[in-house]
Image: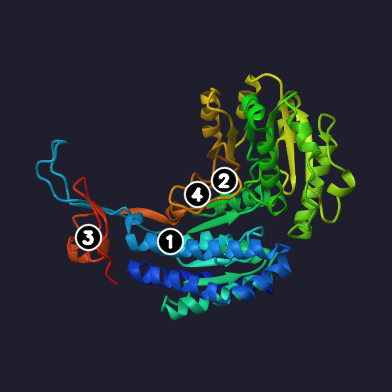
Amino acid sequence: MTETPIPAVDEIVVHAAQSATAWAAVPPVERARALRRVAAALDSRAGDLIALARGETHLDEQRLHGELRRTTFQLRLFADVVTEGRYLDARIDHFDPDWLMGASRPDLRRMLVPVGPVLVFAAGNFPFAFSVAGGDVASALAAGCPVVVKAHPGHPRLSAATARTVREALTEAEAPDGVFAVVSGIEAGVRALEHPALRAAAFTGSTAAGRALFDIAQARPEPIPFHGELGSLNPVFLTRAAVAERLTALRDGLVASFTASAGQLCTKPGVVAVPAGSGFTEALWATGLARGTALLSDRIHYGYVSRLRSLADLGSVDLLTDSAEVFGACPAPAILRTTATAALGDAAAVMSECFGPATVLVEYVEDRELLDIARSLEGQLTASVHATDGDDVTDLLTVLAARAGRVVWNEWPTGVSVTHAQQHGGPYPAATTHTTSVGTAAVDRFLRPVAYQNVPDRLLPPALRDANPWALPRLVDGVPQPCPGTAAG
């Protein structure tokens, strides 16, 4: 894709803003129909799209097929959410002259409404699921917001082909013109973020890039929400009893998790607290790890190798795998080892993200060091504990819940299921807001509440009218009213 000229960026954002009212007013079943049409169009062009992705990302065909399935699944899942209507959180309190607070209660009706045009920064490590037609785009469109996507430079041809597919599908679904567009180039992304008509942004990527964009969003004359999903160590804690009980399974599970997709997953376990003298480190070291593979881009390769060298050069950290292999053009998985004392003494150097196929084993001597390590952490996307039923890890779980968006028990953090209860985000620097970018709750990022007081029924939005023309589940006078039937178009 060629870089989008700045005047064209302005036109695109203005066009998106002009389509906002019409898209927000589309009845739920029609908006859901548009999302399903996009999913069907992507499925119908799967062969061509996956071929483009293979040529631009070094990801294998199996991984890409799975990712495209996830992408179309989440489009259809958001269509179901829109159709059901609970996401609008419609509430009606009728006039009550005898309201218990001592004065009459006015007629109040509250619902969530779309925020307006949204800018989505596509990610590089998921060319389908977090890119032009990914979860951020699906959730924003589901919320009723027009979307402008800033394409990722790592897969420009795929981005262009996906964009054409999405636009054609939305046109066939009779979505308003301007509801979806793509821009390319760093300057174009910044210009769109600064445009006064833009109302929110979403980002998945590095902490440095995300923080820079977050600062731009907050420095605007009118700051806007910037939903950034940034870096994460995804620490894992292994208790002594767990290692004694299932060392081999834990070793194999860790290898599979930190080497998946060459370690280029935001949920890769980057730090693992293991008991010293348990044999776990030696067992992992002796494991025949997979051969190296090319990383997604030259930029990611350079960043990974630079960060890995800085770790290996620390006097307190040992690189256990062959350096010629791990620093090569196709980096082999790297295992590093340090002590809890060293990690706690220089947490900023030892415990920061290394995006790629590497993990750091932090050996602890006393069980209390697990809590010390947990308390030293910054915000994380995930934190995992492998323990037995006999382990008392209540305090550890309490600390981790304060540090991470998702706490995992006896499983590994990679593999983020798209579900209703998923949470993919966490305290800063894992994310810039306390929201999720995966799962149906992701739609909440692009909605805001509005209450109508004593407004005549005929002037209310359909979701709040007494007749309930959209057939939504609502809270009426404090009593949940289930959906009366299929929403009308």
Mark yes or no: residue 24 visible.
yes
Residue lying furthest left in this view?
98
- Quadrant including the N terminus: bottom right
Rendered residue at 77%/30% (across/down): 338
Label of residue 244 in the image? none
Determine which residue is flagged by label 4. Answer: 436
The local crowd at label 1, few if under 14, some if 14 to 19, many if 20 or more residues have their Cα within 10 Å, is many
- Looking at the image, residue 39 sits to the left or right of residue 61; the answer is left
- Looking at the image, residue 321 sits to the left or right of residue 251; the answer is right
Q: Is residue 435 above or below residue 23?
A: above
Determine which residue is flagged by label 1. Answer: 78
Q: Earlier in the sequence, mark 2 or mark 4?
A: 2
Depth check: 379 or 46 in front?
A: 46
Q: Quadrant of residue 235?
A: top right
Q: Quadrant of residue 399?
A: top right
Residue 415 in the image: state x and y as whole percent: 58, 50
Determine which residue is flagged by label 3. Answer: 484
Label of residue 431 in the image? 2
Residue 172 in the image: state x and y as whole percent: 45, 81
Task: Determine whether label 1 and label 4 are within 8 Å by CB.
Answer: no
Asked which secondary structure carries label 2, the reply is loop
Q: Earlier in the sequence, mark 4 or mark 3?
A: 4
Give me the C-alpha separation between circle 2 and circle 4: 9 Å
Q: Nearer the viewer, mark 2 or mark 4?
A: 4
Task: Determine whether label 2 and label 3 are within 8 Å by CB.
Answer: no
Depth check: 191 or 487 in front?
A: 487
Q: Earlier in the sequence, mark 2 or mark 3?
A: 2
